[in-house]
Amino acid sequence: MVLTTQAQKPMILLVDDRPANLFALEQTLKPLNATLIRANSGEDALSQVIQNHFALILMDVQMPGMDGFEAVSLMRDYEETKNVPVIFVTAISKEPQFVSLAYQSGAVDYLFKPIAPAVLLSKVSVFLEIESRRIELEEVLDQNKKMAAHNETILDCISEGIISFKQDGIITWANPRALRLLETSLDELTNINLIDLFRNDDDRMPLSWNLFQKLHSMKHRTHSRNAEYFFKRPDESYFPVEFSTSGFNATLEFGGVLSFQDITERKWTETELIRLAQEDSLTQLPNRALFHKFLRRSLQERLRDNGSLALLMLDMDDFKKVNDTLGHDIGDLLLQSVSTRLQASLRQGDLVARLGGDEFGIILPVIRRSDDAGHVAKKILESFEQEHNLNGHILKIGASIGIATFPEGGQDIQELIKSADTAMYHAKAAGRNTFQFFSAEMQERVQARDKLEKELIIALKEKQFICYFQPKIAPNNQLIGYEALVRWQHPTRGLIYPGDFIELVEETGLVVELGEQMLEMACRQTKLWIDEKVITPETTVAVNISVRQLNCDTFVQTIKDVLEDTKLPAKCLELEVTEYTMMDDVEHAIKVLSELRDLGTKIAIDDFGTGYSSLTYLSKLPLNTLKIDQYFVNAIGVDHNDESIVVATINLAHSLNLMVTAEGVETEEQRLFLIKNKVDFLQGYLFSKPKSIDDLKVWITEENRQPITETV
């Protein structure tokens, strides 16, 4: 392996199979004083790591051939590469099993695309600083070793402390270096026994002159070296030494010479390297590596004594909002403050570690009953009730805690962590700032969720998802378009509605592939109906877009490919996005939607009025249509205030040259009110429920031929 010298820039390996992603990472990291190396696959990354030393690896997960998890696992199998820090940068699910798999494979962090440049720069800078410190420490250690070898070989230990002694161990002479190290004079040192310099440790057999001679003779040579001993000074202070003895014969029969050196600095360097490898640099808490080591040892002890232990996984509630609103400096101070409180809340012998981000792991190595863990969790949550004063910012933040006990929650580390994570997510779902114990019921839900996820993967592979369409109607009752809605045609359970699976599809990231299938089916069917003259060439099909699709770097190209493949004119495709979809990164959403609109597609904002920043970006977004949420439509004839909101929304949209669609229209009263107030399009059960392809074709050809007169 080629080692980076101090004169060289630290190297960062960027691994992604998409050149666009690599370019984006390079642009983000350009301000750093580092050399950026590309790898376009897991195999390429392994080749680069074997040839070079990297301060950090930013690794994509999903790649053709060897994925990121496999590549990192292989790296951890080799001594030369096992300690290279790896941060996964991925667009796949935040679901716990993927995050857990990443950390199990050896990653130090797990980031989700898109990543704020400031966040990535901050995290990468920490590892560059660690690399700089590591190089400095290695250089110090290397210099010490070279110095020892040089002095021993060339100067015969002249630069070390040198003591001569007689056959009975009585000291007869010492050089000035030895006197300085021992802080004594030649008169005080001579005529005492060499053994009196050694400090006797509890874990070692006390040295005597006879034992010393035997140890020397066991080397079968006139020169022997021993390490990791301590020498005493007259004031009873002591320091670590490495010493060697040279006798005039193998048994020291005629006396000999002892040379020694103070290895305090080297010991500090070794200790510091160990600390850096096992300690979180921000909070000085144990890191993930030490956490796993302590948990493994605790499990072994409980297996031997048939005892119990508890594992607590803690996640701070709404920590992201602190970083987003007050900045990462305040976020770091908050993490440090929380770490202090966690340590104060634990019992002696317990361990708390920072596992990454705002996630902490707490090990209670001995518990008598599960209530012990509950008591600790309550104490932690009580400490969170106190406000944090961070450079004048007064903050109060909660925490969600999941608890798993051994042996009930799992028989090994992986099972325990998964169980505690599951309980923690249930604590969040239960309202946050609380704790939950892992239970059999949770396990059943996890298993059911895992089964559903596997079925969804098969469904995507076998194309079991189908399109249903709900018509959109003009005020004169003419069909102007329809919205594509997903249904799952399960081979044994029949037709499944999205409420039973769409949440998991979004969480696991399968929504990207499902979205592409829906887009292709909707566009292909619409083009077929246009060719068959079932609908006019002006009819539009609306397809819903998820936040993961919008954030996917290849999304615009996917739209282009589908339109080209299906031959559907771009003007016939309307892409519906919600306010929530855009809130993570509004500027990115504006950029992507602008590119899509430039293709000729229409853009609609769905569920308008349910978000918290509707008006802030409305004028900036490249929209064609605004859809009024059915919550407000259902209030027509019931709540005058909501009716006023509907009217104001229609007027606002028209003032911005936007068309308006009212969804969820179910009564004639609602229809008449909306038409009176100049709504452009209507959608709802009053006209038609979502229909299959065959049923909608019948509806179009037989029931929606003639427009009706607008009535107010």
Image (tube, rainbow, N blue to C red):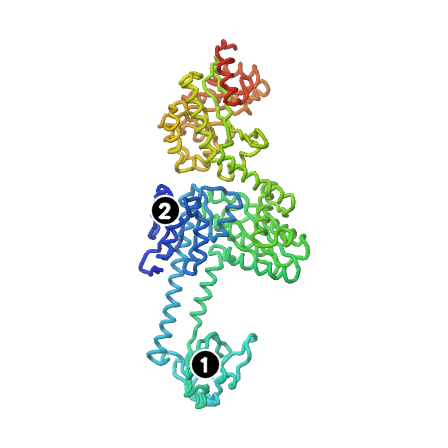
Whether residue 587 is visible: no
Residue drawn at the location 56% of the way across and 42% of the way down: 450
Q: Answer left or right for 630 relative to 3.
A: right
Relative image position of residue 558 (x, y in whole percent): 39, 33
Residue type indicated by callout 2: Asn
Left or right: where does residue 543 sit relative to residue 313? left
Q: Is residue 561 above or below residue 284?
A: above
| Real-space CA distance between mark 2 and mark 1, rounded to the nearest whole angstrom | 54 Å
Q: Nearer the viewer, residue 193 or 708?
A: 708
Looking at the picture, how far across and down is residue 569, in whole percent? 38, 23
Q: Amino acid at mark 1?
A: Lys
**Image quadrant in which you'd find residue 200:** bottom right
Q: Earlier in the sequence, mark 2 or mark 1?
A: 2
The residue lying toward the viewer, choosing from 502 and 220, is 220
Instruction: Measuring from the top left, give residue 336's x and y in whole percent.
Output: 51, 53
Helix, strand or loop at mark 2? loop
* Corner quadrant of residue 497: top right
Q: Which residue is mark 1?
A: 219
User: What kind of element bears circle 1?
Assistant: loop
Residue at the extreme left? 7
Q: Label 2, on which residue?
A: 40
State the image coordinates of residue 403 (x, y, percent, origin top left). Answer: 61, 50
Pointers 2 and 1 in contact (CB under 8 A)? no
- In the rendered image, the quadrant that contains the N terminus is bottom left
| Crowdedness near tag 1: few (<14), some (14–19) or many (≥20) residues, C-alpha within 10 Å | few
Q: In the displayed structure, does residue 32 sit left or right of residue 413?
A: left
Whether residue 39 appears in this view of the structure is yes
